[in-house]
Amino acid sequence: MLQPSSILEEVQEHLPSMLAADAHELARQLQIHQTKIFAPTAQKTIRSFQPSEAAAFIGIGEGYLRQIAAEGHGPEPLANGRRLYSSEDMDRIRRVLDDKNGAAKYVPTRRPGEKLQVIAVMNFKGGSGKTTTSAHLAQYLALRGYRTLAIDLDPQASLSAMFGHQPELDVGEAETIYGAIRYESPRPVAEIVRATYTPNLHLIPGNLELMEFEHETPKAMLQARTEAMFFARIGEVLGDIESFYDVVVIDCPPQLGFLTMSALCAATSTLITIHPQMLDVMSMSQFLSMTSELMAVVERAGGRTSYDWMRYLVTRFEPNDGPQSQMTGFMRAIFGNRMLQHAMLKSTAVSDAGVTKQTLYEVERSQFTRGTYDRAMDSLTQVNSEIEALLRSVWGRK
């Protein structure tokens, strides 16, 4: 009969092989599932938009949009006489409107003197809606006409997957931002940026390679290397491509590592997502304290830690949940105007779209009950419009 210690040693001896086998089988089954819902040869596309949606993205009334389209500046009508507008159609109409008005009013790209806006979306705790927020914000800004770059800093690479880039299959060595910020033989960041199926939206994808920065940075610090310190490296490479973009959205990993601190030093603003439940709020308390201490050290070393704005965003909010409403009120009493006025509602429409790695801007309204879809879209629009207003305020625009 085996002694308990012998049994323990046997389990420990075989644990690595068991984990490796499980990882291999899980990856295989996930790939089978992925092939079923999204064939390897397929290409994701952004859908066309109804006139009411297109008018809202452009920033005009639906009647005025019909007039512009009737003048020959819109898409050809369908058999039923209705028009559907692509992202390219909306961009073309913005340019037409600016030409008509003789002023840069509808094309929202940066003007001379307006600095690049870099938003770091972060939280220490997983499940706070950080990646969902980042994906919808980046895509919303692109549909509004801003030249947008999304950076996936999370080794799990969920943002990359949502935008059609599978981390295990489509992202090779040095094809994440690690390739541009690594200490040995960095690549030009322009070689790493990828176009997406959404016009105006580019992506720097992520995968497990990003963890290398966490491992290599302590070695570089011990060797007292003369290159830019770890906290300045993301900001430095963004400086090489800033003229091509208006806004950068960084999906930070759910940890306070060197990558997150580098993102915070590159950022001009921060968005902290929080699920309004006691355990999440308690975790955020520790997160804020740790972030404060670490960034104070970075600041003494020369890192930039001042921001144009910082906001807390309540995510996955259920208005009819009493404890959640109480917790949200509790946070508003503490943080005041640093809380966004609107919350991101919990919605089956958003979660169901996520099953097929889509955003709500990509799925058709007909796939959901009308009320469910409209409530979710209204919530997204309110949150993203509020963030857009903060960006425009920094630029001194109305």
Image (cartoon, helix red, strand yellow):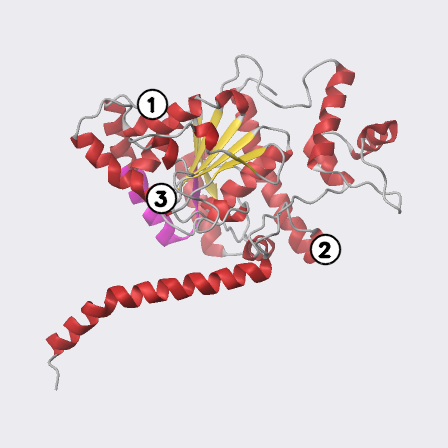
Q: Compare residues 236 and 257 and report the one nearer the observer.
A: 236
Where residue 137 sits in the image (x, y, percent)? 55, 38
Q: Three-letter amino acid code at disc 1? A: Arg
Please tell me whether mark 3 or mark 2 is closer to you in this view. Answer: 3
Measuring 56% from the left and 23% from the top, which residue is drawn there?
392
Within 10 angstroms of label 3, few (less than 14), some, or many (20 or more) residues? Answer: many
SS of the residue under disc 3: helix
Do callouts 3 and 2 mark residues in contact (Cβ within 8 Å)? no
Where residue 276 sits in the image (x, y, percent)? 44, 49
Q: Which residue is mark 3?
A: 209
SS of the residue under disc 1: loop
User: What residue span does the magenta drawing correspond to?
Assistant: 271-290
Main SS, magenta residues: helix
Q: Earlier in the sequence, mark 3 or mark 1?
A: 3
Where residue 154 sits in the image (x, y, percent)? 40, 44
Q: CA distance from mark 3 to mark 1?
A: 26 Å
Where residue 68 sits in the image (x, y, percent)? 82, 28
187 in the magenta segment: no
Q: Which residue is mark 1?
A: 304
Q: CA distance from mark 1 to mark 2?
A: 47 Å
Query: Can the viewer see residue 289 in this picture?
Result: no
Query: Can the viewer see residue 325 in this picture?
Result: yes
Q: Three-letter amino acid code at disc 2? A: Ser
Please count the marks in the image.
3
Measuring 62% from the left and 38% from the top, which residue is drawn there?
198
Measuring 33% from the left and 49% from the top, which residue is drawn there?
282
Q: Which residue is mark 2?
A: 366
Please tell me whether mark 3 or mark 1 is closer to you in this view. Answer: 3
